Amino acid sequence: MKKVILLTMFLILGSVSHAQGVHFGIKGGANFANVDGDLSNSKSITSFHGGIFVELNLTPNFSIQPEALYSSQGAKVEGFDDVNFNYVNIPVMARFYVLPKVLSIDAGPQFGFLVDDDYGNIPGDYKSKSFDFAIGAGATVNIAAGFFASARYNVGLTDASDEPGTEIKNMTAQLSLGYKF
């Protein structure tokens, strides 16, 4: 496992050294989260996300953007308290610039690591999985002077609950504002 991690780090560092530009930045914004699956009486909650990223420009129209985001997700369950999942998410977005340096279409995998969960007063002894895998897609508009706005939708592909016979998948829309250095 250590060899795979080291190889990945060398490949990323090699890409950075050949990249036409490297931009670091911060971003944050609103989450509109819900779950899909066995909690059929769930409704969307509004929460937040925030963190850091690095954009590695490989060509003028293509870049890779790994991020590290703290993200609060979950759902409101009718008749009960909110279900909350707090993750450190690592999305790795491929960015295709439709309008060079202005508008990009972004897509890629997201790896989520559970920090905390709360099932409120829902009856039962629910347990959450410590890892969540999702696919994200969206768009980013570079506004001016390093500022940007983005919208993304993340679809969970793995169950968030470790409860046997229970399927709960995260579904999160994100609106972000950020700054590239």
Image: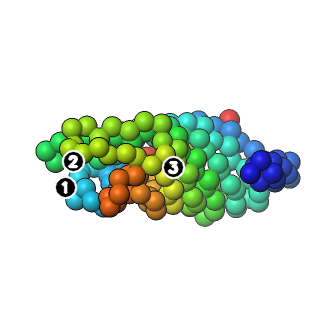
User: Which one is earlier in the sequence, the residue at label 1 or at label 2?
Assistant: 1
Q: Amino acid at mark 2?
A: Val
The image quadrant of residue 25 is: top right
Q: Residues within 10 Å of mark 1 (few under 14, many from 20)?
A: few
Q: Nearer the viewer, mark 2 or mark 3?
A: 3
Question: Residue 166: image x %, image y %?
Answer: 32, 58
Query: Residue 77's mark?
Result: 2
Q: Which residue is mark 1?
A: 41
Q: Residue at x 74, y 51 (%)?
A: 1
Q: Are marks 1 and 2 in contact (CB under 8 Å)?
A: yes
Q: Residue at x 58, y 47 (%)?
A: 90
Question: Residue 5: image x %, image y %?
Answer: 75, 49
Query: Residue 95's mark?
Result: none
Q: Which residue is mark 3?
A: 131
Badge 3 marks a residue whose secondary structure is: strand
In three-dimensional space, the C-alpha distance between marks 2 and 3, rounded to whole angstroms, equals 22 Å
In three-dimensional space, the C-alpha distance between marks 3 and 1, rounded to whole angstroms, equals 24 Å
Question: Residue 143: image x %, image y %?
Answer: 55, 45
| Viewer-proximal residue among 123 and 174 | 123
Question: Residue 74: image x %, image y %?
Answer: 34, 46
| Viewer-proximal residue among 85 and 56 | 85
Q: Amino acid at mark 3?
A: Phe
Badge 1 marks a residue whose secondary structure is: loop
The image quadrant of residue 94 is: bottom right
User: Which one is earlier in the sequence, the residue at label 2 or at label 3?
Assistant: 2
Disc tally is 3
